[in-house]
Image (cartoon, rainbow, N blue to C red):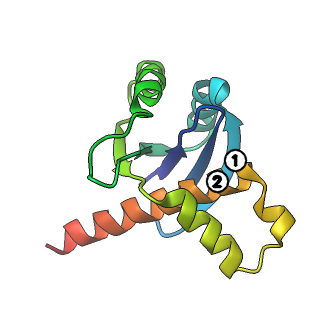
Amino acid sequence: MGRLLAIDYGRKRCGIAVTDPLRIVATALATVPSAQLVSFVKDYVAREGVDEIIVGLPKTLAGEPSESMRYITPAINRLKKEIPGIPVVFHDERFTSTLAHRAMIDSGVKKNDRRDKAAIDRMAAVIILNGYLDAMQMSNKR
């Protein structure tokens, strides 16, 4: 069993999180400029066993894909082309940035440190990955 890698894609930067090889714990890995996402993921996948890539799917409150899909789709298509052997799936990311900010407050992160958008992006990727793991667990129980 290999790791799962999650991406919180943004126009400027992407938060990245991974699981351990047993897929028990999701941890923040990095924040990379969006233009460097494909090369970062290719390098990581070459070093570590990754079975699947999960990308945050931005949706509106009505559940429809949001406007930001117009810049996410081309980037993820490039990723799929460069790493054809690893499935890429989307997972709902509604409210992940808000949840990430709230988690930082709840864990006692100082106000100045909470302004670090890169840290919020990493935390959002962890939340996406945990949501995906929870969904996998629920579907296995059925």
Instruction: Find residue 128 and report its horizontal and vertical position in percent.
Output: 46, 57
Secondary structure type for disc 1:
strand
Instruction: Find residue 83 and report its horizontal and vertical position in percent.
Output: 46, 25
Q: How far apart are marks 2 and 1 (CA)?
A: 6 Å
* Residue shown at 19% from the left, 75% from the top: 141
Secondary structure type for disc 2:
helix
Instruction: Find residue 17 and report its horizontal and vertical position in percent.
Output: 58, 53
Marks 2 and 1 in Cβ contact (< 8 Å):
yes
Q: In which quarter of the image is the C terminus?
A: bottom left
Which residue does the numbered mark 2 point to in the structure image?
A: 122
Front residue (pair 43, 64)? 64
Q: Which sits earlier in the primary sequence, circle 2 or circle 1?
A: 1
Q: What residue type is labelled 2?
A: Arg
* Residue shown at 78% from the left, 58% from the top: 115
Image vertical order of residue 54 relative to residue 111, above or below: above
Image vertical order of residue 132 relative to residue 140, above or below: above
Which label was assigned to residue 30?
1
Left or right placement of residue 49 versus residue 91 in this view? right
* Residue shown at 72% from the left, 50% from the top: 117
Instruction: Find residue 26 and report its horizontal and vertical position in percent.
Output: 54, 63
Determine if residue 39 is in view. yes
